[in-house]
Every structure is written in structure tokens, then in C-alpha cells.
Amino acid sequence: MERTYRIIPYEERFRDDMIFMVLEAKDALGLVPTLREDLLDVRGNYLETGDGFWLAVEADEIGRERVIGCVGYRSVPGTDDAFLHRFFVKAARKRQGIGTALLSVAEEAVRGAGKSVLRVHLGGDPAVWFESRAFYRKHGFAEYAPRYMEKRLFGGEC
């Protein structure tokens, strides 16, 4: 049975499942599965500020929709920049186009908000985040400082 997913704007009914997926994804990376407080209130920290947050969801074996990925962005006040946040794909679903689909939706929203630079912080240990670096490079991002990458959304190189 081929499993299909869809990308949707954040819905509160998926909050706990999203949190579990993020903790599971961090554990799969060998990280201590801690939770950033912004995920406890996505609506207040992303949506009500005019920024965005999306979920990748798919139906499980019995038809319940489960979260298999997420991404959000926050605008940097007083600039044309935005930062990606909480970009995770369930470990068992990596390399299936889900991350690319989430990134595409986020990039389109950031462009629509009039932002011209999309940035990401990659965390500390390069051994943990090597996969992320390769993913972002593949999608046009370039490093501009240690542990930071960016992509210009309206022409021009980083």
C-alpha cells in the first residue's frame, strides 16, 4: 500500500502528535529529545505574529492522520529576512520528498510575505547536522557564518 501525505497549515488538533514526532526525530538524530517552548503554542508564536507553520500529515494503517513532518518560519523584525524553525521529518520518512515539499511551501509563504532572504541555524555539532547541511545546499542555500545558511529568494546569489 502506497502511503501518501499532504502539507497543511498548522491545526491545533495535531499539536500533541507533532510534539511527539519532533521528540522522536531528535532521538533518531542522537540528540537529547528536548522540546522548545514555541511548539507548545504554535498559534501564538507563529500564526498570530503573521508568520507561518505547516505540517506534513498522512493516514496511518487504520486511517488516523499522523504528523510526519513540520516547519515554521519567523520574520526578523525590521529586515527582509526570515528564519526557518522546527524543520523536522520523521526519521522513517526521510528521503521521500517530504522535506522538499515542506520547504517549498515555507519558501512560497516567505516570498509572499515580501521577505527576500530565508535563513536557517543548523545547531552545534556538524556530525549531527551533516544531513541538514547537504539538504539545504541541494535547495540553494549557502553558508554565511558557522552553523548558519541562507537563500536569497528574489534572484542573486548568497
Image: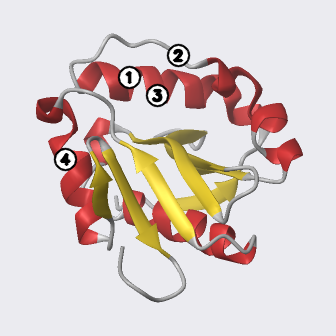
Element assignment for label 4: helix
Element assignment for label 1: helix
Residue denoted by label 2? 35
State which mark lies toward you, 1 or 2.
2
Element assignment for label 2: loop
Residue denoted by label 3? 22
Q: How far apart, in angstroms, are the residues tagged by discs 4 and 3?
A: 16 Å
The label shown at residue 131 is 4
Disc 3 marks a residue whose amino acid type is Val
State which mark lies toward you, 4 or 3.
4
Residue denoted by label 1? 24
The label shown at residue 138 is none
Q: Is residue 17 above or below residue 58?
A: above
State which mark lies toward you, 3 or 2.
2
Disc 1 marks a residue whose amino acid type is Glu
Labels 3 and 2: the sequence-earlier one = 3
